[in-house]
C-alpha cells in the first residue's frame, strides 16, 4: 500500500487492474482447488452462526426449545422485534448514534489535519508529534482507563455522553493519522509544488488537493473507527452508569441479563443493533475495501 | 501498524522548502494544523499513560481520596498468585489466536487476491462478523454453545453439546474460536492487499522455471509477504491484549479464573474490588507487555514495516 519510498510507486494503470493480479493463481492453468475448498469451508463457518441468529430471532420461544435449531421457524413471528423496539433500545440507539457521530467527525477531521501537517512539514514538533502517535499504536489504550475515569470525574463529565466521546476521539487518533499520512504521502509531490507555485496557501492545498485525493482513506478511517466506537463496551461500562446514558452494546448486555432464557428476543436485539452498521457497510463497502487494501483508486 | 517505525519519516524526502521564502510561516501554519490532534491525544492518551504509573504508587478506592502509598500496590500485585496466571492466560490467548488466524488469513488472502469467480461475494460475506460487537458475539455464542439448548443439543451432536464455557480449557478454546471467527476475514483482507502488490513478473518467471502452485506459494508469496505478516501480527498481538469485552461478557473470566486475562484482571481489581492502586499496577504491566511486543515485532520486521501498513 502506501509505499513510502522516494521512487514512484510501481502501480499499473487502473485499466489493467483486473486483468493481472500477481497472485500466484495466474499462469498456473489448473484451478486452485485447495484455496477454493478452504474459502467455501470458511464461508460455512461464518454463515452458520449468522443464519442461526437470523432464523432464531423470528422464532417463538416455545418454538426455540422444541425445534431443530437450524430449521426455519414454523410460525415466524415479529414479536421478539416488537419487544426489543418497545424496550429502552430506541434510546440506546440514539445515544450510540450521538456518541459515534460526535466522536468520529472530530476525530477524523483533526487526524486529517495532523496527517497533512506531518507529511508536509519538517519541524521538530511535527516529527515529535508523529513519533508520539506511533507510540500510541503500540499501547493498548484500554490500559489507561483508570486515569481516564479520574479525569472524567474531575471534569464533571461522569455519566454523560461526553465522557465517552472525548476519550473515543483521542483513542482514534494514532491509527487515523498513520493511515491518512500514508495516503497523503502517496500524492505526487509535483501536485503540491505546482499548487504552491500558484500561490496557494497550505489550507487551500489541504482542502483542494489532499482532501479529495485521500477520500478513500478518509472513508476507511471513518468506518474502521466508527465500528470500534459503535461497538465499544469498556468506555461506556466505566464512564457511565444510568440507563438513560446507556449505549447499545451495554444495553445488549443488560438485556441479556434480564431475558437470559428468552434467546429469540436476545438475538432479535443482536440483529437490530447490527442492522444500522450493516446498511452503512453495504453503502460504503467498495470504498472500505479499496481503502483497506489501499487501492489508490482515483 | 508497524507504527513504531519512524523510518517512514526519514525516507520521506524533505519537502522542498527551498522553493521560495515564507517557509517559517508555512511551518507555523502546519504546526497549528497538528495541534488539535496533539492536544487531544496528550489529554486523553499521554496524561493517562503517565497517570497510570503515578496511580500505581497510590491507594485509592475510586471514590474517595487518593493517597500516596509507595510500593504497596506493586507489592500486592507482584506477590499475588493471580498475576502469573493472568499473564499466562494472556499469552496463551495471544499465541493461540495468532497460530490459528495467521495461516488461515494468509491462505484466504492469497486465494482472494486471485481471480476467483465469487471473490467479490466471498469478501462481502466474510466481512459480516466484523460488524458485530464483541458483546453481541459473546451473547450469541453463549446461547449457541449452551449444552442444554444450544446447537449441539438441538442437532443431537454430543460433540457440540459439551459444557463449553464450564470447563477451563474448553472456555479458552471458545475465546480463541470466537476471536478467529471475527477477525480472520479482516486479516485475510490485509494479506489480499499484500499479495496484490507482489509483481506479477515474479510469478511468470517462476512459471517458466516450472514451479508449481505450491512451490510458488512458498518461494514467492510467503517471503514477499514478510512485512505484511509483521503488520498483521502486530495488530493481532496488541489487539489480543484488549480482548476485554468479549471475555467479560462470554465468561467473566471464568470458569474459575481460566479466562481471566490481564485486561480483565485490571477491571475486576479496580472497578469491582475498588483497588485502583493495584489495578493501575496491572495496567502498567499491560502497557509494558504491549510496548515490548510491538518493539519485538518491529525488530523482526526491520524498519520498512511502516510502509507496509495496509490501512488496518
Image (spheres, helix red, strand yellow):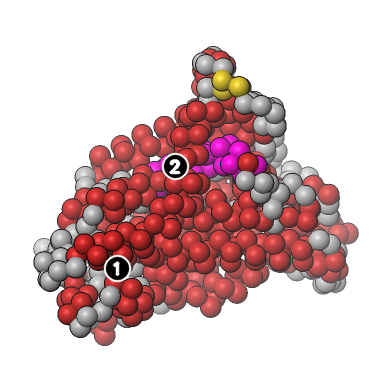
**Left or right position of B280 against A95:** left
Q: Residue furthest bottom?
A: A15
Which range is magenta? A137-153
Can the viewer see residue A174 in this picture? no
**Nearer to the camera, A108 or B151:** A108
Which x, y percent locates residue A92? Answer: 73, 61
Which x, y percent locates residue A298? Answer: 32, 80
**Pointer 2 residue:** B46
Which x, y percent locates residue A198? Answer: 20, 83
**Left or right position of A91 against B208:** right
Q: Quadrant of residue A294?
A: bottom left
Q: Is residue B270 above or below residue A78?
A: above
Residue A140 among magenta residues? yes
The chain carrying label 2 is: B
* Picture residue at 43% right of the left edge, 75% below the top: A287
Secondary structure state at the residue bearing disc 2: helix
* Picture residue at 11% right of the left edge, 63% below the top: B209
**Nearer to the camera, A226 or B38:** B38
**Left or right position of B17 against A48:** left
**Pointer 1 residue:** A184
Which x, y percent locates residue B252? Answer: 67, 37
Amino acid at each position: 500500500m502506501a509505499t513510502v519510498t522516494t521512487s514512484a510507486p510501481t502501480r499499473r494503470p487502473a485499466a489493467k487492474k483486473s486483468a493481472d493480479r500477481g497472485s500466484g493463481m495466474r499462469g498456473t492453468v489448473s484451478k486452485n482447488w485447495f484455496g477454493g475448498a478452504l474459502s467455501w469451508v470458511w464461508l460455512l463457518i461464518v454463515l452458520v452462526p449468522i443464519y442461526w441468529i437470523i432464523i432464531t430471532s423470528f422464532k417463538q420461544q416455545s418454538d426455540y426449545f422444541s425445534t431443530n435449531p437450524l430449521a426455519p421457524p414454523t410460525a415466524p413471528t415479529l414479536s421478539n422485534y416488537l419487544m426489543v423496539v418497545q424496550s429502552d433500545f430506541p434510546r440506546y440507539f440514539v445515544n450510540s448514534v450521538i456518541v459515534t457521530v460526535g466522536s468520529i467527525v472530530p476525530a477524523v477531521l483533526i487526524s486529517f489535519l495532523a496527517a497533512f501537517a506531518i507529511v508536509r512539514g519538517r519541524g521538530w514538533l511535527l516529527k515529535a508529534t508523529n513519533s508520539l502517535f506511533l507510540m500510541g499504536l503500540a499501547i493498548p489504550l484500554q490500559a489507561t482507563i483508570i486515569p481516564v475515569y479520574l479525569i472524567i470525574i474531575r471534569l464533571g463529565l461522569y455519566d454523560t455522553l461526553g465522557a465517552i466521546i472525548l476519550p473515543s476521539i483521542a483513542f482514534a487518533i494514532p491509527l487515523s493519522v498513520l493511515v491518512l499520512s500514508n495516503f497523503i504521502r502517496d500524492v505526487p509531490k509535483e501536485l503540491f509544488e505546482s499548487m504552491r507555485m500558484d500561490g496557494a496557501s497550505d489550507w487551500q492545498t489541504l482542502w483542494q488537493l489532499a482532501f479529495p485525493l485521500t477520500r478513500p482513506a478518509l472513508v476507511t478511517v471513518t468506518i474502521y473507527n466508527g465500528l470500534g466506537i459503535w461497538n465499544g463496551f469498556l468506555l461506556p461500562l466505566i464512564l457511565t452508569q444510568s440507563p438513560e446514558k446507556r449505549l447499545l452494546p451495554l444495553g445488549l448486555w443488560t438485556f441479556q441479563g434480564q431475558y437470559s432464557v428468552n434467546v429469540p428476543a436476545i438475538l432479535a436485539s443482536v440483529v437490530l443493533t447490527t442492522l444500522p452498521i450493516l446498511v452503512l457497510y453495504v453503502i460504503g463497502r467498495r470504498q472500505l475495501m479499496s481503502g483497506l487494501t489501499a487501492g489508490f483508486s482515483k | 501498524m508497524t507504527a513504531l517505525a519512524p523510518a517512514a519519516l526519514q525516507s520521506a524526502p524533505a519537502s522542498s522548502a527551498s522553493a521560495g521564502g515564507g517557509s517559517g510561516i508555512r511551518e507555523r501554519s502546519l504546526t497549528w494544523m497538528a495541534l488539535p490532534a496533539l492536544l487531544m491525544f496528550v489529554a486523553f492518551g499521554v496524561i493517562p499513560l503517565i497517570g497510570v504509573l503515578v496511580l500505581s504508587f497510590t491507594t485509592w478506592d475510586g471514590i474517595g481520596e487518593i493517597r500516596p502509598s509507595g510500593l504497596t500496590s506493586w507489592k500486592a500485585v507482584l506477590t499475588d498468585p493471580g498475576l502469573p496466571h493472568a499473564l499466562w492466560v494472556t499469552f496463551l490467548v495471544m499465541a493461540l489466536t495468532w497460530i490459528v488466524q495467521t495461516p488461515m488469513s494468509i491462505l484466504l488472502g492469497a486465494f482472494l487476491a486471485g481471480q476467483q469467480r465469487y471473490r467479490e461475494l466471498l469478501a462481502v460475506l466474510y466481512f459480516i462478523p466484523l460488524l458485530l460487537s464483541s458483546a453481541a458475539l459473546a451473547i450469541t455464542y453463549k446461547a449457541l454453545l449452551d449444552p442444554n439448548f444450544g446447537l449441539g443439543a438441538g442437532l443431537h451432536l454430543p460433540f457440540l453439546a459439551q459444557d463449553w464455557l464450564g470447563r477451563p480449557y474448553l472456555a479458552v478454546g471458545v475465546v480463541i474460536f470466537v476471536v478467529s471467527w471475527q477477525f480472520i476475514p479482516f486479516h485475510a483482507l490485509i494479506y489480499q492487499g499484500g499479495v496484490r502488490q507482489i509483481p506479477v513478473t515474479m510469478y511468470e518467471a517462476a512459471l517458466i522455471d516450472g514451479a508449481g502452485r505450491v512451490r510458488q506459494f512458498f518461494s514467492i508469496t510467503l517471503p514477499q509477504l514478510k512485512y505484511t505478516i509483521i503488520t498483521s501480527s502486530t495488530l493481532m498481538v496488541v489487539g489480543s491484549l484488549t480482548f476485554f469485552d468479549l471475555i467479560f461478557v462470554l465468561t467473566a473470566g471464568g470458569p474459575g479464573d481460566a479466562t481471566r486475562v490481564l485486561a480483565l484482571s485490571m477491571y475486576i481489581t479496580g472497578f469491582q474490588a475498588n483497588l485502583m492502586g493495584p489495578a493501575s499496577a496491572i495496567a502498567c504491566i499491560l502497557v509494558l507487555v504491549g510496548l515490548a511486543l510491538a518493539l519485538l515485532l518491529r525488530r523482526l520486521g526491520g524498519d520498512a514495516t511502516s510502509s507496509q501498513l495496509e490501512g488496518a
